[in-house]
Image (cartoon, coloured by chain):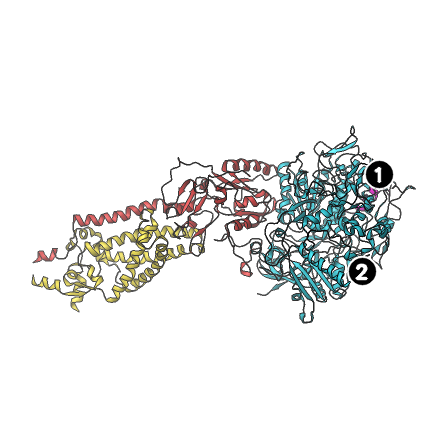
Amino acid sequence: MEEVKNLEEIEVERFSAFDRFVHWLTAIPFVYLFLSGLGMYSPKFAWLLPFLGGKEFSAWLHKWAGVVFAVGVFLMFLRWANDFVLDSDDIRWLSNVKHYIKGEEEKLPEVGKYNAGQKIFGWMVFLGGALFLVTGIVMWFPESFPVNIVRLSILLHSLAFILVGAGFIVHVYMGTVGVPGSLSGIITGKVSALWAMHHHPKWFRQIMRR
Amino acid sequence: MATVTTEGTVGLGLRRVSASKSPDQSVKQADQLAILVDISSCIGCKACEAACSQWHDLKPPLNVGQQAFFGYQSGPGLAPNLFMYMRFQEEETPNGLVWAITKYQCMHCADPGCLKACPSPGAIVQYANGVVDFDHSKCIGCKFCLSGCPFDVPRYDANNKPWKCNFCIDRVSAGLEPMCVKTCPTNALHFGTKEEMLIRANKLLEGLKKRGFEKASIYDPPGVGGTGYIYLLPHGDKPEMYGLPKEASISPLVSLWKGPLKLIGSIVLWGTLLGAFLQLILFGPIKVGKKHKKEE
Amino acid sequence: MTNGWNDIKNADLILVMGGNPAENHPCGFKWAIKARQERGAKIICVDPRFNRTAAVSDIFLQIRPGSDIAFMGGLINYVLQNKKYNEEYIKHFTNAAYIVKDTYSFDPQTGLFSGYDPEKRKYDQSLWGYELDENGTAKKDMTLQHPRCVLQLMKEFYSRYTPEVVEKLTGIPKDKFLEVAKLIAETSAPDKAMTHLYALGWTHHSTGTQLIGSMAILQLLLGNIGVPGGAINALRGHANVQGMTDLAGEGRFLPGYLRPPRADHQSLKDHIQANTPKAVDTSMNFWSNYGKFYISLLKAWYGNSATPENEFAYHYLPKIEKLISMDEILDRMYKGKMEGFVSVGMNILASNPNVRKIAEGLGKLKWMVVIDVFETEMAGFWKYVDDSSKIKTEVFLLPAALFAEKEGSFTNSGRVIKWKYKAVDPPGEAKDELWIAGQLWMRLKNLYKKEGGKFPDPILNLTWNFQNPYYPTAEEVLREMNGYALADLTDDKGNVVVKKGERLPGFGVLRDDGTTACGMWLYSGIFPQSGNRAKSTDLSDPSGLGVYPGYGYSWPANRRILYNRASADPSGKPWSEKKKYLWWNEAEGKWVGYDVPDIKPDLTPDYGPFIMLPEGRGRLFCAPLVDGPFPEHYEPFESPVENILHPKTPHNPVVKIYKSDLDLLGKPDEFPYVATTYRVVEHFHYWTKHIYGTSVLVPNMFIEIPEELAKELGVKEGDKVRVVTARGSAEGYVLPTKRIKPLTINGKKVYTVGIPIHWGNEGVVKGALANMITPFVWDPNSQTPEFKGFLCRLEKVKA
């Protein structure tokens, strides 16, 4: 009990200042992009736009937020692409993901710094970001591209939105309510040792050895 | 020219509104309007082009210099400050050389792709008389209308607002013919109800066929539900010669995006949200300590 | 136009040759479209380029510039050989039956008519007349068999123009030519008519007048003159150029085509006698009224100062020794023989050939006044002079009002005079020309009054009865043109028809005793006591033939179709029900119909319909033309090929050319391509480039060349090329086109290069003056320059 309490009180660094900077550099524009994109994508959410600065403004800022987002995603890719390589444990983890949903992590292979879900979301962001960027540029300057490329871009932009959007919902949920104790990692950079040992035991042992 | 009025701009009924439910059609009815372009009588004088710019108070681009040489054309095509232009194309045909000269502008589709693509409620409207018009106050500048258009028509100004022929809705609403029709010196442009224009076009078509243009036809593409501008083409088998797509319709990519994909998107996004919620209430958050606490 | 614009809708066949009405007369061209839509008329376009008229024509033939008479000769030959002419018509309404003097001859070997003097480069035209009997009446052979009757002479003359020869000269394939010839010949049927539309594409040749003569011959042979849907229709280029011509726009005329006094006519009597022809047949011989028109004009000008005692002030007018036409003016200027020049609404630098010569000439003037709406190239001519440092010409630019900024009348191509109201005030200091004229005149007059002068009478005595002499109104001037009675005018029975002081009802009441004043006899009747008929806008058309007698006023006498008596056969019955227009009402003993008869209404049908001629008959053989009574093909002065008909006389032997260091001509070895200049519909001369809205429509000066030539030269669309001729060069963007094909002329491949004219160094858009390169060669009858068909080479301009 003591040990547990200690573990709970001990903080370990999960994300460096740079990591956190890159995350929020990407995340803040993404939130704006997500909401304004939603407003433009579906008239049912057009009411969002006034809260984002108005219709015209949000359509305008959407493009520039996209640029910032693209820079963020690029930095993320440099930072995390290596970390997000899936291994055989990840595959087993994924095939038994139902246990994770139920909170039965003990029935899953031990997880390193990132679990397979996080890794996949990472790749979704990388690939989705690239797709958003390419199609977004086409949509930004539709007069400069063949019209069918523009049409395809709009379609793919929407598709990327659906997939990354869904991932985003999961990501936010897991980062806040879904897995308590996670949020501090991306805000202060620190998580409790207990949280680390519990959710990412392999990683925990690594930092412990150090 | 026929004198068709549309009961005043303020009272113009609407048939379609972008990103909105269809307006109630039962309240206000109007005849569908049309302009017939009789290519066989058009001499390509550009009086319509000049008159259009003059009526709309436009200052069209001045294309001078080596990079901007377009022969008989005033420029490469439409521009935010040029709502229509005359297109020139030389083509050898079995019947000899043809100099296809075509008045090009918004076609005012019965089923307008621009309106379909537009995400902003009310930024594009189709009046009850069939005229398709933009409302810049509601436009968000996303330029989707260009991708929706089968005829490559809308052009954007510095503020990303689209511009195009509005069928001189101001004149038409006051009972006048559109400016291009008014100006045409050879009566190659006719204005009236779509019904009248089709009757007239068919009569002219007969004459053309008698003159040996066996492939002559009326261009009123069904893929977009017909158009407000209909053309009498002497070489009807080759509309491309006149810069008109052979099969004009809203691109399947646009239809896919505005149709099935919207539904899929709703299902996926709402589904994900629902999934997260179910996880929360069924299993609860994935907390630290379930295992560790047991271990104690 | 011998008929009017609206009448084109009555045509069964529309031959467009020597013009491009779709581009240069788009509003009038609607009647051609109407004829096709409503009557199934065919439109045939013959032109060096597939232009915008060709784009809506049924048949297009590409012709080599300058070979039009060969084509026309071929048509005439076809009609004659195949007996497709309207025999009754030519027998009674033309001089086909007239017997020509045996002193007339034509040598097909030399290409010369009899009487040529190579020294003076002139013909003795007196050798070409008709044989007259003792009464002075022309001898005729109504069987048309006499070997020297006009028809037989013509048959022999044109027998050389076979379809094969036509092909060799024009580049038009024989079968295409025959297809068109057949269609044209069919219009000699009594219920059919062909109209011909032409403009500067025909006049701009060293044989321009002869060309139009050739069409007159063809149309007379086919019986297409004087009938609805027929005619030779000269399409005039400016809104009021017809009015300008009627009002003595050329030095060879006074208002109403009267003649200026000549040095050898030292008395009024001599002058009138010399200009009053004697009838040689049953002819109304309308010019027998010359004296009435002339004296009425002098009375209008000099009022009470024109008395029988002083020969109605005839001696106030200068008596010319030689006709001073534009070519002569420009040449004299270049030779330093002129002191000053006043230009009103003209850009003589841009509009005339060989700009360098003109610019040098303007630089030798002491002063020049340019009255125009824009700062024209002419006003800044020194920019076209190599060394402008020595120029001392003082230039005064007076800003004038544009057409919509002043009121007045327009006389259109169809002779309809229509009033035009002022729409807006002229900008800035720009003034109505009537104001400028009033000011100039009154100041000059005051100077003469104060200081006297060598001969002040013509200035001091000129009638100037305007309410504000410093600013006459257009209606006041029109009233003076219409004329007024200076005494009570009575008819044969002594009844007063016009009271003293009243305006005249028409030129029929003009007198040669000084009791009428009329500034312009042809327009008399436009402003009778009842008011200004140019302002009338009655749109009723009782006949449905587009006559519109109540719309405007058509000179002469509100007549819409000239020679309309010819719409009826020799006995006075309409040729056909379809072409019914004017006919002889036997019971009433007069001509009746839909229009004002173009003949004295009670003159019996045996009188000829061509009332302006002493024959009363149309001329198939036209002796008064200085370059021959029959139109003959001569090559343009610069031609890529020899004249296969008569190599010894390749060009018009009496053409007007000048000799100076700048009057240069090129040879085909150095300048292999045929060039022709023209206009595009988007621009009006050198004006519209000053306006943004029209400049954008076709902003760049371009050079049209066949695609094959572009390939040979290695140039592509948008490259800059330089057209070089013996005179100079002009640059433009090259437009390779399928619309101009290489032609095969007598076995030789010939390329045509097209050069639109509308640019200059002033205005919103700028470009080369096309006339930098055109030759200073002039038609000897009309003094029109040869802009169509000269030689050039092309050079690629490195970017």
Taking the image as shown, residue C3 lies to the left or right of residue B92, namely: right
**Residue that carries the numbered disc 2 in the rendered image:** C455
Task: Tell which residue pokes out farthest to the right in this image.
Answer: C134
Q: Quadrant of the C terminus of chain C?
A: bottom right
Q: Quadrant of the N terminus of chain C?
A: top right
> Residue at point 79% right, 31% down?
C589
The front one of C175 and B38 is B38
Q: Position of residue C456 (x, y in %)?
A: 79, 59
Tell me if residue B228 can be seen: no
Mark number, residue C360: none
**Residue that carries the numbered disc 1 in the rendered image:** C282
Query: What stretch of residues is rendered in magenta?
Result: C141-161
Q: Which chain is yellow?
A: A
Taking the image as shown, residue C470 lies to the left or right of residue A155, namely: right
Q: Is residue A25 above or below residue B24?
A: below
Q: Which chain is red?
A: B
Q: Callout 1 environment at 10 Å: few (<14), some (14 to 19), or many (20+)?
A: some
Q: Position of residue C680 (x, y in %)?
A: 62, 52
Specify which label sits upstream in the sequence, 1 or 2: 1
Q: Colour of chain C?
A: cyan
Q: Chain of mark 1?
A: C
Mark 2 secondary-structure assignment: loop
Magenta stretch holds residue C160: yes
Q: Position of residue B255 (x, y in %)?
A: 39, 45
Mark 1 secondary-structure assignment: loop
Q: Is residue C592 above or below residue C285?
A: above
The front one of C73 and C204 is C204
